[in-house]
Image (cartoon, grey):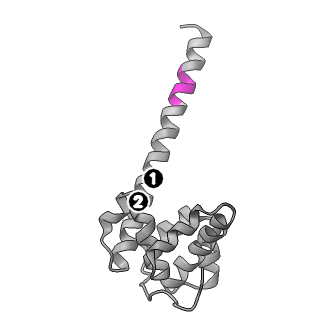
Amino acid sequence: MSAENGLLAIFAGAGVTLFLVILALYVLLVIAEWKIFTKAGRPGWAALIPIYNSYVLFDIIYGQGLKFLLLLIPFFGGIVALVSYFRLGQVFGQETGFCIGLVLLSSIFTLVLGFGSAQYVGPKTDAFI
């Protein structure tokens, strides 16, 4: 086996390993979202369906699922996404520090929210976004 083939095998192995790690993290995040949905009294299977899961998540956060369409507005959509992560923590009764964690490290804090003991308290109805 030449040095080139050996190097190629190392890169291929690293690529496969990285793919498996990303896949495992994705599966964990879907399971955490499933648990978040069930904690909020929504069907967990909704976490598996693209677009509909955004609708359900915004229904949990805002009480109006169609607000997820705000994500489609350039620039404003990014702000809505950040505010939505923050509000996700609030509807589960979390403190400001946890909500900031959801904004900055969403994958980790989504896992904590899904697998932790947080209870759904419902959305505030007075906020625009």
Badge 2 vs badge 1, beta-carbon distance below 8 Å? yes
Measuring 60% from the left and 68% from the top, which residue is drawn there?
A: 81
Q: Main secondary structure of the magenta part?
A: helix
Q: Is residue 65 above or below residue 32?
A: below
| Secondary element type, mark 1 | helix
Label number found at residue 26: 1
Q: Most extreme residue toward the right, as rendered? A: 75
Residue 101 left/right relative to 42 = right
The answer to whether residue 36 is visible is yes
The answer to whether residue 32 is visible is no
Q: Which stretch appears magenta?
A: 9-13
Residue 11 lies, in percent from the top left, at 57, 26
Q: Quadrant of residue 14?
A: top right
- The answer to which of 35 and 125 lies nearer the viewer is 125
Give the position of the C terminus as an image quadrant.
bottom right
Residue 45 lies, in percent from the top left, at 30, 64
Residue 53 lies, in percent from the top left, at 41, 64
Q: Which residue is mark 2?
A: 30
Q: Is residue 44 magenta?
A: no
Q: Most extreme residue toward the bottom, as rendered? A: 126
Residue 116 lies, in percent from the top left, at 44, 75
Distance from label 2 to label 1 (Cα)? 6 Å
Instruction: Estimate how packed mark 2 is, as few (under 14), some (14 to 19) or many (20 or more) residues with alpha carbons within 10 Å.
Output: some
Residue type (three-letter) at the residue carrying disc 2: Val
Measuring 40% from the left and 73% from the top, which residue is drawn there?
A: 36
Q: Quadrant of residue 46?
A: bottom left
Label number found at residue 53: none
Residue type (three-letter) at the residue carrying disc 1: Tyr
Instruction: Estimate how packed mark 1 is, as few (under 14), some (14 to 19) or many (20 or more) residues with alpha carbons within 10 Å.
Output: few
